[in-house]
Image: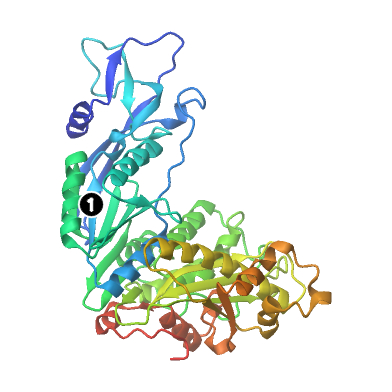
Amino acid sequence: MDEEIEALNKNQIWELVPKPENCKPVTCKWVYCLKRKSDGTVDRCKAWLVARGFSQSYGLDYEEMYSPVAKMVTLRIIFSLAAMKTWKAWQLDVKNAFLYGELDREVFMEQPVGYVSEQHPHHVCHLKKALYGLKQAPRAWYGKVVQFLIFCGFRVSEADSSLFIKLESNAHLLVLLYVDDMIITGNNEAEISMLKNELSVRFEMKNLGEVGCFLGLEIKRLNQGYFNCQHRYANQVLQLFNMGESREKSTPMEKCLKLKKDEGELLKDVRKFKQLVGSLIYLTITRPEISYAVGVVSQFMQAPRTLHLDAAKRILRYIKGTNDFGLFYNKGNDFSLQGYADTDWDGSIEDCRSTSEYCFSFGSAAISWCSKKQPIVTFSSTEVEYIAATMAAQGCVWLKLLMKDIHCAVYSPVQIYCDNQSAVKLTSNPVFHARTKHIKVRHHFIREKVLDQEIALERITSNQQIADIFTKALGKPEFERFRAALGVVNPEYALRGAVKNSASQ
């Protein structure tokens, strides 16, 4: 706490002033945390003085407060590119990052508990810079760091505002920002060292060396590429829900299982179920193969029952046997962007709606995936597959824009694979107009992209459809085959650098 107060005084965050009339100052509190290393050991104790932003008034002491943070898709693309280029990735942490942000409104705050001025106990803190907890603090910090990186020769990505790119004749640098955590990678170590020094001069930085633990993700640089997993987090979840000694399962969901919202006894402790599902959702960052199972159980958050809890625990039993698995981006693969789109027609027994799924891979592993229930009831498998392909096309357009930003542009049409011949034909020629005239105009987005040769929708067989793992609960052989095709492997397999890149292999 003394260190935090010292940092606040050093940055001249506030000045003590008499309390203005008709002023209701923002309250504050102390927050404590243990900072841990990637192996789980305690690194240091940390205390924050946090303003209670809920006591602010909109229009009076804050207005705009949105601040972008790094997308996980962007993070995966960067590590896939770093694996291909054999780049090193470095991690930096900005100490007291929010304290650098400048406020555009007058904000008054109570004096912190334990550090009330003896000379002026009734004064309040007139904030001159942002403080953790203020509504506008993230936005103020983001504006400050963007201003400095642009001064250093970087530009902001059009696709992801938290990604900064510097392209020169001998330097290709990328900086990814997630609040106060930075990842820096590129082809010029001298330029990276210079950037670190410049950042250290402007901000108080902590150099964490090569990236190891970022937002709870464990990232390891191997000779063959980068391995991303959540091994420690998975173990914490298992221990939290008393599943550390449970029996392992080979798949996250029983094959052909269909859950109903009114089947089974209502749970007495709804909070525990919601906490479990939320933990599993965060685990899907590096475990795409559980996305379907997690998506199914998350549909019953309103009134969960015992069968729903059993299905969620089944996912934990699968995690127990594969808690060290993760995404491996291999440097030896052909780095082309390709996608898979699939759906389960009339998959929901509750509302007869289908679930659309797509995934994109760049190199040896998946970088983007989505499993989402469609908002409408469809009339045919052609229609539902066509809508799923349109969703994939929307994701593809954004991925192409992002890859163009990082100087890894895709000029040839991106191949998206679909296992429905009629849907493939419909993108290039509306031959079934009489049976498809009810399809909304926005779902014909993919037809325009196909005609513009930005996307090529290709037909494949069902046993080659990798996205099938996002549509339904599969048996063990099919599940393991598609899981490997997504690039989800164990560390021993990653060390051998032999990830298969297609379901047919």
Q: Residue at x 63, y 65 (%)?
A: 373
Residue 45 appears at what percent x and percent y? 20, 44
Horizontally, is 306 left or right of 505 in the view?
A: right
How is the model colour-coded?
Answer: rainbow
Give the quarter of the figure containing the C terminus. bottom left
Which residue in the rendered view is the most extreme toward the front? 169
- Frontmost residue, 277 versus 206: 206
Quadrant of the rendered structure where residue 31 is?
top left
Asked if residue 373 can be seen in this view, the reply is: yes
What amino acid is labelled 1 in the image? Leu
Give the quarter of the figure containing the N terminus. top left
Which residue in the rendered view is the most extreme toward the right? 434
Q: Residue at x 38, y 68 (%)?
A: 408
Residue 324 appears at what percent x and percent y? 31, 73
- Frontmost residue, 412 versus 49: 412
Residue 451 appears at what percent x and percent y? 63, 74
* Element marked by disc 1: strand
- Frontmost residue, 446 versus 68: 446
Q: Is residue 144 above or below residue 213?
A: above
Q: Residue at x 55, y 61 (%)?
A: 298
Which class describes the residues within 10 Å of circle 1: few (<14), some (14-19), or many (20+)?
Answer: many
Asked if residue 254 can be seen in this view, the reply is: no
Quadrant of the rendered structure where residue 94 is?
top left
The residue that label 1 is drawn on is: 92
Q: Is residue 32 above or below residue 422?
A: above
Residue 399 appears at what percent x and percent y? 47, 65
Q: Is residue 472 above or below residue 272?
A: below
Q: How many marks?
A: 1
